[in-house]
Amino acid sequence: MGENVQPSQNKEQTQKAETQTQVAQQPEVFCPVSLTDASPIGSENSKAEMEQAMQELLKTVNEEGAQLNQFLANESKLILEVCTSLAAVLKKLGASFNIPPENIPFKRKVRKAVLNKTGELTLTYEKDENHSAPLAEYPPDIVMAILWDVIPELARTMTVYRKRLNTRANFFEKVRKELKTVAKAMENEEKQEPNKDQDSRC
């Protein structure tokens, strides 16, 4: 019998060693409270400190959430006002702009992006799929990127438009002066005609 016991003992020792190895390889579980604290008073103090820290964190989350909501509301209002004013300027100028898609953080691949004179952004995707909506309805990051690209072009367009208006104004001013001179001369001639008739009668 002594010979049969020895293999069994070796098998049990092998299984025990494997179990210890598996336990040693398991990852440690994070626990904010020490479970090995032998002092109940120390454990209560740690728990109280954790509860206080959690309350402070929740207070911070609440305050940050309120400010975040306010910022988001203000941002939406500002974006709407900016896009409305931009649309009015574009309509007055009759201008539209091609936006390089690589400059805009679109989620999908865009082949062409156009901001038209009504303030709508039209996107052309692959297979000629189109999407059009007012600029204010796009995410803030896209609106900001569009503005960075459009504002310089808008400034140049307004300069060209102003020069065109100035040229027209100068033309109308010259014509006005000439026509005014002609009209005055014709009025003087009409006044002199009755005098000529009277002289001829005498």
Image: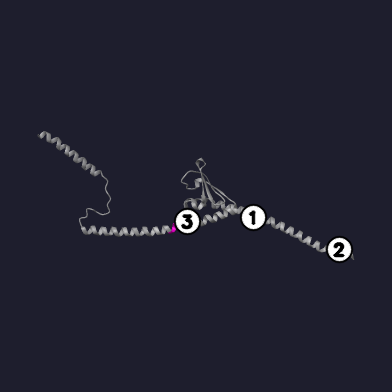
- Disc 2 marks which residue? 197
Q: Is residue 82 visible?
A: yes
In the rendered image, the quadrant that contains the C terminus is bottom right
Which of labels 2 and 1 is toward the front? 2
Q: Quadrant location of the N terminus?
A: top left
Residue 45 drawn above or below residue 8: below
Q: Which one is earlier in the sequence, the residue at label 2 or at label 1? A: 1
Q: CA distance from mark 2 to mark 3?
A: 79 Å
Which residues are the magenta region?
70-78
Q: Compared with residue 80, is residue 19 higher up or lower down, i.e. above or below?
A: above
Residue under numbered circle 3: 76
Residue 89, percent across and down?
Answer: 57, 55
Answer yes or no: is residue 144 visible: no
Residue type indicated by callout 1: Leu
Q: Residue type at mark 2?
A: Asp
First in sequence: mark 1 or mark 3? 3
Q: How many residues crowd mark 1 within 10 Å: few (<14), some (14–19), many (20+)?
A: few
Question: Where does the image place residue 69, in percent across and percent down from the top left?
Answer: 42, 58
Q: Secondary structure at mark 2?
A: helix
Task: Identify the residue under disc 1.
Answer: 165
Image location (x, y in percent) of residue 115: 54, 49
Describe the element under mark 3 as helix, strand or loop.
helix
User: Could you tell me how far apart the alpha carbons at marks 2 and 1 are, in whole angstroms?
Assistant: 48 Å
Query: Label 2: how many residues lie within 10 Å, few (<14), some (14-19) or many (20+)?
Result: few
The answer to which image quadrant residue 24 occupies is top left
Identify which residue is drawn at 48% across, 57% down. Answer: 77
Please report the residue visible at 62 percent of the width from the left and 53 percent of the height from the top. Answer: 161
Give above or below for 86 relative to 109.
below
Rendering coords of residue 85 (x, y %): 54, 56
